[in-house]
Amino acid sequence: MKTMKMIKTGLVALFLSTTGSTFGQTNNGTIDKGPLKVGPTSPHGATERETLLGLSGNASNANFTNQTKKQYEEANAVLFYNPNNPGSGLTLVASRQEDFTGITPAPTRAAQDFTHYRWTYMGQDNSVIKDGTTYNAELNATEGWLKEYLATNDNKLSVTGLTQGYHYFKVQGYIVPAGTTLNETCMQYSETFVVFVLPQLTVDAKRADGGKGVLQYCETEASDQDNVELQADIKYDGYTGSPTLESFELKYTWYSVKADARGNYSTIDATKVDLAGAEQRASNDVTSISNSFSPSIAEVGKYKFFVEVEYTVKERTYDGAETSNARKRTYALYRGWVGGTDQNSATEVFVTPAPGKPHITIEAVQD
């Protein structure tokens, strides 16, 4: 039975490439699970960075309620891919002042403001500078993008249309005193920030027995029946990078739809926004990675089943709870109907009655 493994520290050798000082990073970062760590954060508390991210001292902004700067960056360095609006995007913010963390020996002077920033795209493997103009028109493959800090937002890099997989972006800060030229400045330290866009999934929900067994069981055997076992197999759409498909832990939630007395089924919303007519039967939490499900429904009737799969490395509801009729980010829910491509073609499963004993009476007696 195929399983999906968790992203763990060390499983993915994804360390951020830094030289000397970093803009707010005190340790090398790696993608892992529990807690999630992706990209550099600012534990030392750069107030300018907090302001630029839209955070306040009491996190009063509705988008950052109960979140710290570190939590915000961690949650948003892993992105969902929205096929309805292809590509993902975000804005990277370089600190206004230089950071001496990691420099030995560290300067004893007060930190100064940067005057220029050079942004470069390092591709999906962080090897050499790549052409990133697809994501930002200024990120060419030779010199990147040099910005002089003259106005608000000049220390930001906005990128859009990010494809599935890793993306590395590097920034270097310059301090060019009046009367000097940029080419004559001292060596620049840099920071590299990694973003990961989760690949789309295709769900193949089917019978685990390969279609050889029966699709029914008796009501009295529901609790431990082994006639019907369902399975969800996953494929990654358009993704050729790393980590490999076994590196992700996924959450599987199984649902049933029961036919009425006339044998008709409620129509389940294909957009996945509304679950009316379906009943949740099982949901594997982050400690369970099984992709199989055995129904234990004891109510006699005819049923169809579907499964919804999502990533556990980033929950769809990371920024707040959802309601039953307003599900968040349905494009990050991947659904499969057992035995079919949709509800109409899905396989039917029968829970059959266990007949009681008959009683004998007599009639038309002749002595």
Image (cartoon, rainbow, N blue to C red):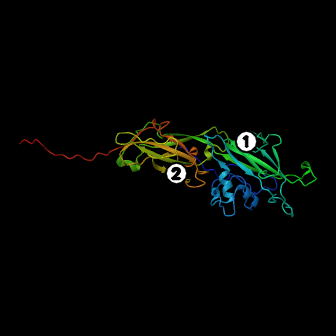
- Name the residue rendered at 41%, 41% in the picture: 265
Viewer-closest of 87 and 167: 87
Disc 1 secondary structure class: loop
Q: Is residue 110 visible?
A: yes
Q: Is residue 17 visible?
A: no
Please provide percent x and percent y for residue 155: 78, 51
Q: Amino acid at mark 2?
A: Asn
Viewer-closest of 99 and 284: 99
Q: Amino acid at mark 1?
A: Tyr
The picture quadrant where one finds residue 70 is: bottom right
Reading the image, the residue beneath label 2 is 284
Viewer-closest of 317 and 188: 317
Q: What is the spatial separation of the Cα atoms under label 1 and label 2, in whole angstroms?
A: 36 Å
Residue at the far left in the pictured view: 367
Q: Is residue 235 left or right of residue 115?
A: left
Please provide percent x and percent y for residue 128: 79, 42
Please provide percent x and percent y for residue 59: 66, 61
Residue at the far right in the pictured view: 179
Q: Quadrant of the C terminus?
A: top left
Compared with 105, 286 (above or below) is above
Q: Residues within 10 Å of mark 1 (few under 14, many from 20)?
A: some
Residue 47 tag number: none
